[in-house]
Amino acid sequence: MADALNTSRLIRSRLAKLRPVGMAFGLALVLLLFLKHQSLAQLFAGIALFLLGMRYLEDGFRAFSGGALERWLAISTDRLWKSLTFGTVSTALVQSSSLVTLFSIAFLSAGLISLTAGIGIVFGANLGTTTGAWLIALIGLKVDLAQVGMPLLVLGVLFERNSAARWRGTGQVLLGIGLLFLGIDLMKLGFDGMQQIFDLSAYSVGGWQGMLLYALLGILATVLMQSSHATLMITLAALASGQLEYTNALAMAVGANLGTTVTAVLAALGANNAGRQLAVAHILFNLVTGVVALSVLPVLAQLVDTLAGWLSIAAESYTLKLALFHTLFNLLGLALMLPLIPVLVRLLTRLLPPPSEPVNEELADRPRSHALYLDGAAQLHAGSAVRVLQQELAHLAATSRQVIASALYLPGSFRQDMTRERDPGEALAVPPLTEREDADVLYHQHIKGIYADIVDFIGHLDCELLPEQQQALMDVNLAARDLVESVKAAKHLQTNLRKHLESPRQAMRDGYRQLREQGMLLLSDQARREAESLSGAADRQQSADYLDQEQLFRSQFEQRLQQQLRAGELDGWQATSLINDLHYLLEISSNLRAAHDMIYTRAALTEAA
């Protein structure tokens, strides 16, 4: 996981270094075009406004994510046909299959949806992209969209300045739609005027060479603009103005779909294995659909002509026929891939298994631990981010218990299964020197790495948060800190334990044996509370029972120390060491219980809200 995150950041840093050179070159080229050819300037300005509108539209819809979204997801994705419908409708609303794909990867990484549901959403998103082509072909190229877009821009600016997330999101959606409309209008004007400069249709290429060339152009345009909708808009505008041949436009539409796989590849770099599973499914769908569509393109074109006649679409209405073709080949992809979903799920699960918590392994035998569940895809959506953070806290809690058990020199059999009931007559043996692990080394090797990943993840979180989600993030911070503090207290306790575990004084040996036994009870109680997933009332009752037992142990331990002092079995120096370490053990208990309540009790309340 950490390697994937580091790779993603390395790629971004290298691209950031190249960006100034690319921006300078692009700016000089655009200025030159603006000065020499107004039509080209209008075309590029239209593309820029279209892409800016897409960004505002995406940001606006992100502002509407919240606690209800998770419940809606659960209802909308419990069947494959529902997942397909969800993906189609959501893409039709936000007009961005890339955004829906990224959110699906985030939802799957957070465990909000199953892999089958995620694949259904992504497949449906591909079908949802066809709605944009139909809207542009039916309305966008025939209506003066600038007249509709300008009032939307005014309203969008007014709403976007509001501090409330919902109003600001509404403003961003209106701004996005307004900019999309202006962009479409400018692109249409740009292509209409380009005939005065040169005729692109004169450079059309027929046959398989032309098909592959324009498919490659569609891929390249989508990769550069990170939007298949923008590529389709350019294709439709060029087709409507006569600058692009119909058969070349069909190949370019297929290339636009293939180009969206790059977004999935980039998302997979920062995702966990669950996210990568969905990214691979998305790539396979587009590759299979694109290759099959290109191989039977003449047949599909003939089928489009036949269907166009049935739908009373004129033979010269190439923009409508392109929209029909776009829908047809995406339906072809669904027909090819839907029967293979069960096989695909099994294959992806085998090749990219979900992360498993290595809580039953010896910590010293493993390399430095890192987060299991945190990935860049989950940072796109507040609900997903909160969910994966709660999962990572559970991982940190399990690892912390392992480190504390090692710090107390508890037996390996206990560390393998902390929920196992211990025989009351079973003696707590002293491990040999070769099996005693240093708590400070284990802390730096395992706890600090996971904690650092949690802090880094929260620090890079960049999405709109509802009040309950902000509270959940505060809870995550507090719980992680409590777990770290519990391990630090165990480090301090181990300092004296190491010195006195085999003390010549029987009272010292007995005192530290009792502290170790109480620590064993504490860790066992925490592990069972987590494993049993008790209801709120039952969990609180079990916690109260343990606290009563802990108070009794503390009272008896302190009374025993007083008796041993009076009997001369201990001196003041030795007694204070035992008292200090008793308080370290109580601190471990307090922090572990506080973290447990944050992880499970408040998480349950958040989900129920």
Image (tube, rainbow, N blue to C red):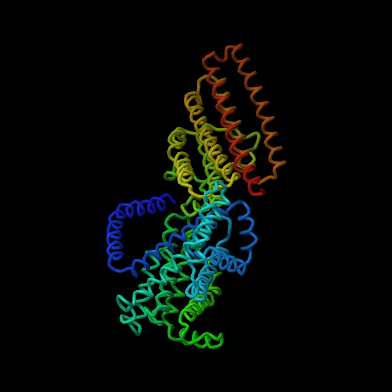
Which residue is depicted at the point 52% across and 52% down? 160
Which residue is depicted at the point 34% across and 70% down? 39
Task: Say how many tags the image has.
Answer: 0
Across and down, in percent, residue 308 comes to 52, 85
* Nearer to the camera, 371 or 298: 298
Q: Quadrant of residue 578?
A: top right
Q: Is residue 108 left or right of residue 438?
A: right
Q: Quadrant of residue 44?
A: bottom left
- Residue 532 shows in this picture: no
Q: Is residue 424 left or right of residue 398?
A: right
Which residue is depicted at the point 36% across and 76% down? 214
Q: Does 85 appear above or below 305?
A: above
Q: Is residue 293 left or right of residue 214?
A: right
Which residue is depicted at the point 47% across and 64% down? 180
* Nearer to the camera, 599 or 96: 96
Q: Does 173 appear above or below 578?
A: below
Across and down, in percent, residue 67 comes to 61, 51
- Residue 183 shows in this picture: yes
Q: Quadrant of residue 227?
A: bottom left
Across and down, in percent, residue 194 comes to 34, 74
Across and down, in percent, residue 263 comes to 43, 62
Q: Does 193 appear above or below 33?
A: below
